[in-house]
Amino acid sequence: MIDRALYHPDHSAIDIDTSVTTLETTGTAPPSIPEIIEYLANAPHRVILVDNTSATSLAEAYPALLRRGFSIITPNMKAFSGSYQLWEDIFSSVQAGNAVVFHESSVGAGMPIISTAKELVATADQITRIEGIFSGTMSYLFNMFASALGSSGSGESWSSIVKKAKELGYTEPDPRDDLNGLDVARKLTILGRLVGLRVESPTAFPVQSLIPKELEGTADGQTFLQQLDQFDDRMKSYKVAAEKEGKVVRFVGSIDVESKTLKVGLESFDTMHPMATLKGNDNIISFYTKRYGALPLTIRGAGAGADVTAVGVTGDLLKAIAQLR
C-alpha cells in the first residue's frame, strides 16, 4: 500500500541518493489520480509514468493518462486482464495521445514473453497454441511436491509445502490468491488478447482452483493454512495417479488459438518433458507456430521475484525513451 508521496510542486528533480530517507521523513499524503494527471500535465518535458503497483484504480485511469500524452511502463497485469472494454480503451488512447505503453513484466517478470508474442504477430507468423507454467509460486509448489512425497506416502505433505512457501515469501500474503489459479488466468487473458482473441475476462474460461471447496469461505489466510492439511489426500491422489503412469503433475495454462479456447489447471507430463524438468520457481512458456513447426519456441527462466521484474520494467523504460526521442 502506498501511504506517502515525494514530489516537488515546481517539478524540480528529486535527489535519488537521499530520496528514500526524504520520503520517510517529509513525504506527504499521496495525491488523488485526477491531481496526479493535472500535476503531470504541467511537467516541462514529456512524461513516462512507471506504475509498479497492482492498483486497480490506477489501471483504470490508464486511458485518461495516455490521452493526455503520458506514456506508461508497468508490470500491473490488472490493466490488461481487466474488462475487454478497458483493454480497447487503453490502446485506442495510446494512438490518441501519441504515447506508448509497455508491460513486459505483466507476464513472466523479466522474461521476454510479451515482446515475443507481439513480434510473432507483427511478423505474420501464425500462433496455433501457447502453453506453459506461468506462476513462479505454483512452479515452486509442484517442483517441491514432486520430490517430497512418493507414492509410499512418506515425505512432506502438500499443506506443509504450501506453508513453507509462504514462510519463504514465495506466495502472496494470503496463499489462496495463488491457489485459486486467477494469477495464471490473468496472464493467459493478456496473451490471448495479444494474439487476437476476444477474451472477456480471466473468469470467462475454465480455471481449476486448488482451494478445497470446504475452505473457500475461510475467514483469512492463516486459518486456511491451519485447516489445509485436512485435504492433503486429495492432492496426493493427483500425484499418485501421475506416478503410476511415470509422470509428474504441473499447474499449467494453455491457449488453443485455432479453437479460441483457454484453460488453467493440473496436467501430467512425462518426467523428461520440459514442463517436468523445471527447478525452483522457474517459468516456462512455449509458443507453437506455423513458422517454427513441430517444435515450439520456448522461453524458460526466472518468472517471479523483485529483481527480475525490475529488469523487465527497466528494459521497457529504455525502449520507451528510445521510441519517444
Image (cartoon, rainbow, N blue to C red):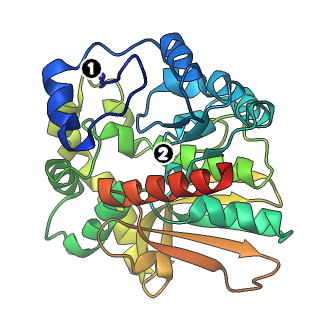
Residue 221 lies, with reference to residue 283, above or below; the image says above
Q: Residue at x 73, y 47 (%)?
A: 193
Q: Residue at x 37, y 38 (%)?
A: 177
Instruction: Give whichever of 47, 29 is nearer the camera.
Output: 47
Horizontal side, residue 35 vs residue 309: left or right:
right
Residue 75 disc label: 2
* Mark 2 nearby-residue class (10 Å; few <14, some 14–19, many ≥20): many
Can you see residue 211?
no
Residue 76 disc label: none
Can you see residue 177?
yes
Q: Residue at x 61, y 28 (%)?
A: 62
Residue 4 disc label: 1
Q: Residue at x 32, y 75 (%)?
A: 279
| Foreground tag (1 vs 2) | 1
Instruction: Give whichever of 145, 110 is nearer the camera.
Output: 110
Kindly identify the amino acid type of the residue bearing the numbered disc 1. Arg
Assign a secondary structure to mark 1: loop
Image quadrant where one finds the N terminus: top left
Assign a secondary structure to mark 2: loop
Residue 318 lies, with reference to residue 43, above or below; the image says below
In terms of image quadrants, where is residue 61?
top right
Give residue 324's position: percent from left, percent from top. Answer: 66, 48
Residue 38 lies, with reference to residue 225, above or below; the image says above
Q: In whole angstroms, how far apart are the C-alphas of marks 1 and 2? A: 21 Å
Kindly identify the amino acid type of the residue bearing the numbered disc 2. Pro
Instruction: Give whichever of 46, 274 is nearer the camera.
Output: 46
Horizontal side, residue 208 vs residue 291: left or right:
left
Instruction: Give whichever of 243, 301 is nearer the camera.
Output: 301
Looking at marks 1 and 2 on the same chain, the residue that comes earlier in the sequence is marked by 1
In terms of image quadrants, where is residue 164?
bottom left
In terms of image quadrants, where is residue 154?
bottom left
